[in-house]
Image (cartoon, rainbow, N blue to C red):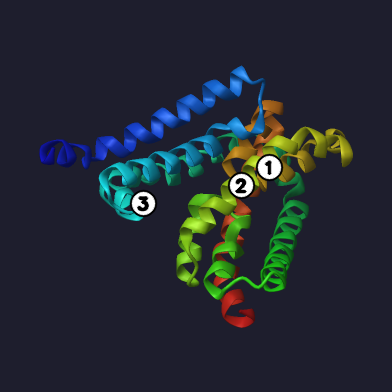
Amino acid sequence: MTTLTNNLALPFTGIFISVAVFLLGQWLFKKSGGFFLFQPLFFGMVAGIIILIVWGKIQGTSTSATYRHFYKPGGDIIFWFINPVTIAFAIPLFKENKVLKKYWLDILLSLIISSVICLFIILGAAKLVGLSHSSAAAMLPQAATTAIAMPVADAIGGNSAITAMACILKAVILYALADSFIKIFRLQHSKIGLGLGLGTGGTVGSAKALKIGALEGAMASVCVVVIGVVINLVAIPFAHLFM
C-alpha cells in the first residue's frame, strides 16, 4: 500500500488527472451541443476537485493534503506551460498587425480605461458584500487572464486559488453567453469590438474569438496582452491605495 501511495505521488498522477478530466469535458461539451457547464476548462476544474475530495476521504487525509501530495507535483508542470501558451496569442496579432497599427491608440486607451474602471467595480462589489481583505485581493486582478492574475493576487495578499476560480468562472460565463452578448450589443458589426470584448475572457474568450474569425482572434489577443500588462502595473499600487 505504501509503495502504491508513493508511486501515485509522482508528477504523472497530476498530469494524468488534468488531461483525463479535460478530455472528458471536451467530449461531453461536443456531445451536449456546447452546454456551458461542460466547457472543458470549467468541467475539468470541478471534476478534478471532486476527485481530490473523494481521494482524500479514501486515504483519510484532508483535501488540501491530497492536493499537495498527489496532484501538485504534476499540476505545477502543466501550470508551467500556461505562460508560453499565453505568449502564443501574439501569433494572430502579428498576422493582423495592419489593423493594430491603424487603431492602436483607440484600442489601447479603451482597454486601459476599462481595466482601471474594472478594478474600482470589483473593489466596490467586494466591500458591498463584505469580503475579507484576502478574498477581495484575490478577486481584484481577475480582469487579467489566469496565468497573470494569480501571481498578482499573491503579491497583494490574495488567495490565488480564489483568483483562478474567479477567472475561470468569468471566462466560462462569457463563453456561454457570447452569442447573446454579440446580438444584444450588435458586436457583429464591429470585428474589432467583438474581438476585444471576447478577449476579456482570457484564453477561453480568445479561443471563442478565433472560432469567429482571424481579426476577432487577433483583437482578443491584444486584449489579453494589454489587460495583463495593465493589471500587472496598476493592481498592486491600486490595492495599496484603496484597500
Mark 2 — residue?
169
Residue at image coords 71%, 62%: 118
Circles 1, 2 touching at the beta carbon (< 8 Å): yes
Question: Which one is earlier in the sequence, the residue at label 3 or at label 1?
Answer: 3
Asked if residue 137 is positioned above or below residue 8 in the image, the reply reads below
x and y percentages locating residue 3 in the rendered image: 11, 38
Task: Give me the C-alpha separation between circle 1 and circle 2.
Answer: 6 Å
| Residue 97 visible, this angle | no
Asked if residue 52 is positioned above or below residue 37 in the image, the reply reads below
Q: Residues within 10 Å of mark 3 (few under 14, many from 20)?
A: some
Circles 2, 3 touching at the beta carbon (< 8 Å): no
Asked if residue 79 is positioned above or below residue 141 in the image, the reply reads above
User: Looking at numbered disc 2 in the image, what kind of residue is underneath it?
Assistant: Leu
Mark 1 — residue?
173
Mark 3 — residue?
63
Q: Name the image quarter holding residue 123.
A: bottom right
Asked if residue 143 is positioned above or below residue 134 in the image, the reply reads above
Badge 3 marks a residue whose secondary structure is helix
Front-most of residues 29 and 205: 29
